[in-house]
């Protein structure tokens, strides 16, 4: 019997870190800010207020599209998406429907597999609902500081086949966005939000779709996917089609749970936002934005591998932390001076053997100095232990460990055991 | 002549020469409001600061009459349609959903008038949410036509038009989605001007149909319309649809030509609609002759039947209305959704339907396609002609109650304004005669941003005719 194959697509929402909100001049940052202090008629949806789009947010969304190999639409517009919810003061969200800023791109995984990107569009974030008990009364509070913050949505095709693959896709996406410096992608602060769409089929497409929301770490995405694969497989094997629904994830129980049924498609009554004229982007406009693209993580990794001979996994680790990577590039000349090869330098940075808040040259110097001090101690240890040296020369190489221990003792554990071992071997073989 | 009967330009002359004060002028208007509002129901809310504002203006005039250069409407009292937000002063859009709504910010039009020194008398009645062409859908009762109280003033800016016609105010501000300035101006026998869509900011105007809403003045003559438009027009960073083009409206240049030589005007034969009465069409023919005698070159042309525009406009407007009213969800503003009356509910339902999946292409999209057709036709027309003329309404003001049981009442009444509105053109309505002692209006319509040309031709016509008249408002003694 053929196996059920997972069909996974991701919807990722990312808040842009622009100074002001998407359609008004209010500050866009909202984390731990006194509620309802970053508001104005526009983001409160007051009568008569009109949205004026934030150009920076549009540029940044297009830049992400370009980084994800998307086609930028020369004609684009905003649309109104209608639904009723207390966090939506206008009764509609300004989003993009059929003309997103960019579409049809891809992101390549380490295996070489391409994950197709359906679209990258821009919309406004909603207000934040806070459910609390005040004076023994259950209340729902609304904080409009988040209302109108620029929010990108990156939708993938259902090309992902496992939790592991999805995790890799998400990490890569996050690294690209961080490299573009357009969002912090901080899941704790809600600036990156993840939604999994998952179904199973033996071949081709499935006739249902389960959405899992409220996943605030890549690990939870992986776990939720694995749980869903098991759950849906069990159902399908019994001949039951899983329900079309939105599910939440409980990380403590490592289980997903039903949130709401989605059997009937909601009609959002999309139509072009009449308050914002349609936008046209010329080839020149797009070329200008393209020229602003910084070097992307994947390019950096390739360069590190070819130019500096770093193993790809090391290069990837280094690049995933932009501060580490920058420090590495800056420290390269200094490392060369102290005869430390790039791989060693990378390891020192990744393993936190050197402090990246301090200057590289002095730290690297002291590391190499250690090496010269070691030589004196090694000489000392060899002359102080003639019996052991004799045994070694007679072929009992296991005694080398004792000599290394002696060096470590003398240096109060400061010496690098690998280096010590190498130096001892050098010394002993010279004497021979 | 009483002070409240003055035009803006007459009042400014008086203020400059210190023959009158802004306080006197404002008080004269307030007195007339007090005397006539119970009959007309044109004002919903009075500005308790009006006299104080007038006093401030008088101090500025006393300081230097040069202040008129800086504040072109210094000390001039006016009325604002109640869908323009005014900080601290109740704004309802004539809908009880906003019965006690006190705005937190000013509409751009209001703040520009304030900056120009104008004195706000109060807020005028309109059809609830501007849905209608008679003010009969107002949750605060219908306004009446100053020429005959049994008739409606038209709408939706009916309160503003009635206020100007009855000399309750020196001028007024209205807003037009399709005919809401020009229609009531026509029926009340005053001058109404709809600037190009995007020429005047919509910021702070309670939205009706976002893609056609255009604020504009209702005045006692064309010259005043130019004066007011010059103040309120111009790019607004708070309205993304407002045009960045510089404002080239100049009242002092309206009289630079005495004749209409070289002006080519189109008269679409389809605008002489079957619904139009013979006396009305007679008056339009007279107006055409008058313009010809002044030197204009007028050709009869053929355009898309305005009846098509009814469909286009109805679908687009209802769709946008259903979206724009979504924010009054019963959670905010203090009144439940049941406060919405029949007309609004009707429009929301129709709009929600035309936008729903499966019907969008059939209705909304189709309407937008025909809209493009209308725009293209106008573009072609304006390659050959400077302007277009025709009736603005098929006849004089209808009796109160005529809109009842006629869900398409407004659209039929406004049929002749709709093509120009959906194309975002600029147009003027000015009196061209009377039928049964009720005024009839002529429309002069131009391409986008041709405000100055439209006003110039209107001004010359008005200078050479005597139709800008005002009714007797001694209603108490009738």
Image: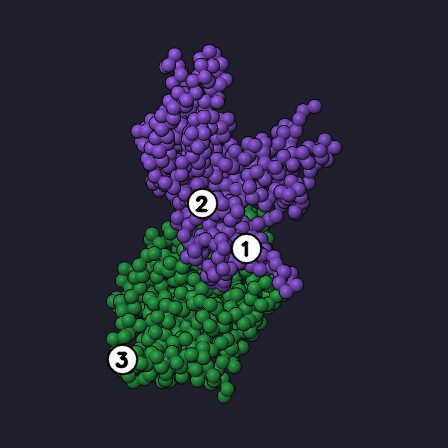
In percent of the image, x 36 and y 74: which residue is there? Answer: B118
Q: Is residue A19 visible?
A: yes
Q: Secondary structure at mark 1?
A: strand
Q: Which of the two marks, 3 or 2, is nearer to us in this view?
A: 2
- Which residue does the numbered mark 1 point to in the structure image? A128
Q: Are marks 3 and 2 on the same chain?
A: no
Residue B23 location (% of width, % of height): 37, 83
Q: Secondary structure at mark 2?
A: loop
- Which residue does the numbered mark 3 point to in the structure image? B63
Which quadrant would residue A359 be assigned to in this image? top left
In percent of the image, x 48 and y 44: which residue is there? Answer: A185
Residue A202 location (% of width, % of height): 65, 28
Colouring mode (rainbow / by chain / secondary structure / one colour): by chain
Residue at the far bottom: name it. B477
How crowded pointer 3 is (Cα within 10 Å; few <14, some 14-19, many 20+) is rated as few
Residue B102 location (% of width, % of height): 50, 70
**Badge 2 sits on which subunit?**
A
Q: CA distance from mark 2 to mark 1?
A: 19 Å
Residue B371 location (% of width, % of height): 46, 51
**Badge 3 sits on which subunit?**
B
Which chain has been coloured purple in this picture? Answer: A
Decide if residue A222 is on the left or right side of residue A329: right
**Badge 1 sits on which subunit?**
A
Q: Quadrant of the N terminus of chain B?
A: bottom left
- Which residue does the numbered mark 2 point to in the structure image? A183
Q: Is residue A282 visible?
A: no
Q: CA distance from mark 3 to mark 2?
A: 55 Å
In front of the other: B284 or B198: B198
Q: CA distance from mark 1 to mark 3?
A: 52 Å
């Amino acid at each position: 019997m053929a196996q059920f194959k997972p069909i996974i697509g991701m919807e990722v929402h990312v808040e842009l870190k622009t100074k002001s909100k998407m359609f008004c001049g209010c500050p866009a940052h909202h984390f731990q800010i006194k509620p309802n202090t970053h508001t104005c008629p526009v983001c409160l949806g007051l009568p008569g207020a009109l949205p004026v789009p934030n150009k920076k947010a549009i540029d940044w969304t297009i830049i992400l599209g370009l980084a994800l190999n998307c086609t930028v639409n020369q004609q684009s517009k905003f649309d109104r998406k209608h639904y009723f919810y207390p966090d939506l003061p206008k009764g509609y969200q300004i989003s993009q429907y059929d003309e997103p800023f960019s579409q049809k791109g891809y992101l390549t995984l380490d295996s070489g597999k391409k994950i197709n990107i359906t679209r990258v569009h821009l919309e406004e974030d909603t207000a934040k609902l806070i459910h609390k008990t005040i004076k023994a009364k259950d209340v729902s509070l609304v904080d409009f500081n988040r209302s109108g913050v620029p929010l990108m949505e990156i939708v993938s095709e259902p090309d992902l086949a496992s939790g592991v693959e999805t995790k890799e896709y998400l990490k890569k996406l996050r690294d690209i966005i961080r490299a573009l410096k357009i969002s912090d992608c901080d899941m704790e602060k809600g600036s990156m939000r993840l939604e999994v769409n998952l179904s199973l089929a033996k071949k081709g497409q499935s006739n249902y779709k389960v959405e899992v929301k409220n996943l605030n770490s890549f690990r939870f995405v992986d776990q939720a996917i694995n749980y869903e694969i098991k759950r849906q497989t069990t159902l399908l094997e019994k001949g039951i089609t899983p329900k079309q629904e939105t599910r939440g994830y409980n990380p403590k129980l490592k289980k997903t749970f039903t949130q709401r049924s989605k059997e009937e498609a909601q009609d959002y009554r999309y139509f072009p936002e009449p308050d914002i004229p349609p936008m046209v982007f010329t080839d020149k406009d797009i070329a200008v934005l393209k020229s602003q693209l910084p070097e992307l993580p994947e390019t950096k990794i390739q360069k590190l591998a070819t130019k500096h001979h770093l193993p790809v996994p090391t290069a990837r680790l280094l690049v995933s932390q932009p501060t580490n990577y920058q420090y590495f590039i800056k420290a390269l000349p200094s490392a060369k001076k102290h005869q430390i090869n790039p791989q060693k330098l990378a390891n020192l940075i990744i393993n936190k053997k050197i402090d990246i808040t301090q200057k590289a040259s002095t730290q690297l110097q002291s590391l190499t100095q250690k090496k010269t001090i070691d030589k004196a101690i090694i000489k000392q240890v060899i002359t102080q232990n003639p019996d052991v040296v004799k045994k070694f020369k007679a072929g009992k190489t296991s005694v080398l460990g004792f000599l290394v221990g002696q060096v470590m003792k003398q240096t109060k554990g400061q010496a690098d055991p690998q280096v010590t071992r190498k130096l001892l071997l050098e010394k002993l073989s010279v004497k021979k | 002549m009483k002070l409240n009967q003055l035009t803006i330009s007459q009042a400014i002359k008086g203020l400059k020469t210190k023959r009158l004060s802004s306080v006197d002028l404002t008080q004269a208007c307030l007195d007339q409001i007090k005397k006539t509002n119970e009959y007309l129901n044109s004002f919903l809310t009075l500005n308790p600061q009006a006299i104080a504002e007038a006093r401030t203006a008088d101090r500025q005039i006393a300081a230097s009459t040069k202040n008129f250069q800086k504040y072109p409407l210094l000390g001039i009292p006016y009325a604002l349609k109640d869908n323009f937000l005014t900080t601290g002063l109740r704004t309802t859009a004539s809908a009880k959903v906003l019965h006690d709504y006190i705005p937190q910010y000013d509409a751009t039009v209001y703040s520009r008038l304030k900056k120009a020194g104008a004195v706000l008398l109060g807020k005028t009645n309109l059809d609830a949410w501007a849905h209608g062409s008679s003010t009969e859908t107002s949750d605060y009762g219908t306004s009446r036509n100053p020429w005959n109280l049994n008739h409606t003033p038209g709408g939706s800016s009916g309160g503003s038009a009635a206020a100007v016609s009855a000399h309750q105010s020196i001028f007024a501000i209205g807003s037009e989605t399709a005919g809401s300035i020009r229609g009531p101006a026509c029926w009340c026998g005053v001058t109404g001007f709809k600037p190009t869509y995007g020429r005047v900011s919509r910021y702070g105007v309670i939205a009706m149909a976002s893609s056609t809403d255009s604020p504009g003045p209702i005045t006692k003559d064309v010259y005043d319309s130019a004066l007011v438009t010059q103040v309120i027009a111009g790019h607004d960073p708070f309205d993304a649809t407002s045009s960045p083009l510089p404002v080239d409206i100049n009242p002092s240049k309206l009289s630079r030509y005495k004749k209409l030589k070289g002006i080519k005007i189109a008269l679409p034969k389809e605008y002489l609609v079957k619904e139009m009465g013979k006396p009305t069409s007679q008056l339009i023919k007279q107006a055409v002759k008058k313009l010809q005698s002044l030197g204009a070159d007028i050709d009869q042309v053929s355009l898309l039947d305005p009846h098509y525009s009814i469909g286009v406009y109805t679908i687009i407007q209802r769709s946008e209305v259903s979206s724009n009213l979504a924010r009054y969800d019963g959670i905010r503003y203090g009144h439940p959704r049941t406060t919405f009356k029949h007309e609004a509910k009707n429009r929301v339902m129709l709009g929600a339907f035309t936008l729903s999946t499966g019907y969008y292409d059939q209705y909304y999209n189709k309407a937008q396609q025909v809209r493009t057709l209308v725009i293209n036709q106008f573009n072609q027309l304006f390659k050959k002609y400077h302007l277009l003329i025709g009736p603005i309404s098929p006849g004089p003001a209808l009796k109160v109650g005529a809109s009842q049981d006629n869900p398409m009442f407004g659209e039929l009444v406004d049929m002749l304004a709709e093509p120009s509105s959906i194309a975002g053109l600029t147009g003027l309505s000015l009196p061209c005669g009377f039928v049964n002692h009720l005024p009839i209006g002529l429309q002069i319509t131009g391409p986008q941003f041709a405000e100055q040309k439209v006003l110039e031709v209107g001004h010359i016509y008005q200078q050479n005719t005597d139709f800008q008249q005002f009714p007797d408002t001694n209603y108490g003694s009738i």
